[in-house]
Amino acid sequence: MKNLEKVIDELQSKVNFSGAVMLLNGDGHAETANFGYANRTDLLKNNQGTRFGIASGCKLFTAIAICQLVEEGRLSFDTRLKDCLDIEFPSFSEGITIHHLLTHTSGIPDYFDEDVMDDFEELWIKRPMYHIRSLKDFLPMFQNEQMKSTPGEAFHYNNAGYILLGLIVEQASGTEFTEYVQENIFKKAGMMDSGYFSFDALPSNTAFGYIDLPDGSWKTNIYSLPVKGGSDGGAYVTVEDMSKLWKSLFGHLLLREETLHKLLTSHAQVNETGYYGYGVWIKKQDDHVLKYHVMGYDPGVSFHSAYYPASQTIAVVCSNKSSGAFDIMKAIEDRI
């Protein structure tokens, strides 16, 4: 069987992958590979300890946080938005529950609607991204808009819903969202190199996100995203830390078995083989789960990670370019 590095090498003419990859078998055997530069200006290469932005890949962390608060009795999945968040939403349905928000079935408006906008950077023309440092800073972008559909009616991927979940975590726990995740998820899972870092205060060995332009030039993504990530996306992880997250989750270090089962239940059907649980995508075949997976795409970020229950294999692909992770993930899956 070809090793991981060789599999990616063969793709490089097509993908020109920049990032880090880890494949951890059920027996604990790990394969790793690193390509490209974390810092192109200074020619600093990506390595296994490099921290990468993972965009929406960290919605899973938000869902875990909510589940932990449910276990503590501070919330329930049926708690209504209006009963757990002291913020006014004049046009929102009174029937929206935490379950709806977790499963993208709330019907609320999004602050970035992919049906209307092509370019994430358009968001920051009127509202500079360097002002977006806390979850409350997102509210003016959707708080007074009209509902898109009735709660529970349809799956529609929604970042604003996860902003609200983060605000619910803050109100229920009395702790800032990013601190809550650091303390109750990253620390418990041993993810010592992960965090929600600000663009203007990045720690060492953190990859810059790169946007390659049609003329062959490039720019970093610092003017394309909020200055600091939150409950809908934007955390930084290493490939090893992400594998620790999966191990801790399935090892019941973060959630009890019954709560984990709820998180991993196929609550909403997305397409023929795709479903959504709480913060996690689920791929099935003939009623068998092939994988639980998360992914994230932003300008200068592409990320895929999955847990394959049949073999207990974990795959993590982090890239500091706008594309590439999907192709690498597909090649890994073709091999396993």
Image (spheres, rainbow, N blue to C red):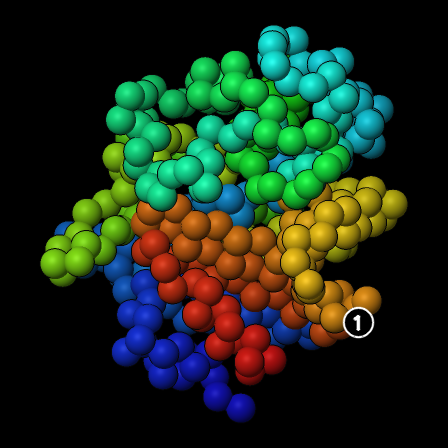
> In the image, residue 240 lies at what x, y percent?
52, 58
Q: Nearer the viewer, residue 257 or 121?
A: 121
Q: Is residue 42 visible?
A: no
Q: Quadrant of the C terminus?
A: bottom right
- In this rendering, the answer to whether 1 lies above or below 297 is below
User: Taking 219 as reference, is 222 left or right?
Assistant: right
Q: How many labels does the image show?
A: 1
Q: Identify the residue at image location x=69%, y=50%.
A: 276
Q: Identify the residue at image location x=33%, y=67%.
A: 17
Looking at the rendered structure, the kind of residue marked 1 is Asp
Q: Identify the residue at image location x=28%, y=42%.
A: 221
Q: Identify the residue at image location x=71%, y=68%.
A: 290
Q: Can residue 213 be seen in this view?
A: yes
> In the image, residue 267 lies at what x, y percent?
77, 47
Judged from the image, the secondary structure of the residue bearing numbered disc 1 is loop
Q: Name the residue under label 1.
A: 286
- In this rendering, the answer to whether 85 lies above or below 67 is above
> In the image, residue 39 lies at what x, y percent?
23, 52
Farthest residue to the right: give it.
258
Query: Which quadrant would residue 272 be assigned to in this image?
Result: bottom right
Farthest residue to the bottom: give it.
1
Within 10 angstroms of label 1, few (less than 14), some, or many (20 or more) residues?
few
User: Taking 177 as reference, is 73 left or right?
Assistant: right
Query: Which quadrant would residue 200 be assigned to in this image?
Result: top left
Q: Which of 118 and 164 is in front in this view?
A: 118
> In the image, residue 193 lies at what x, y percent?
47, 45
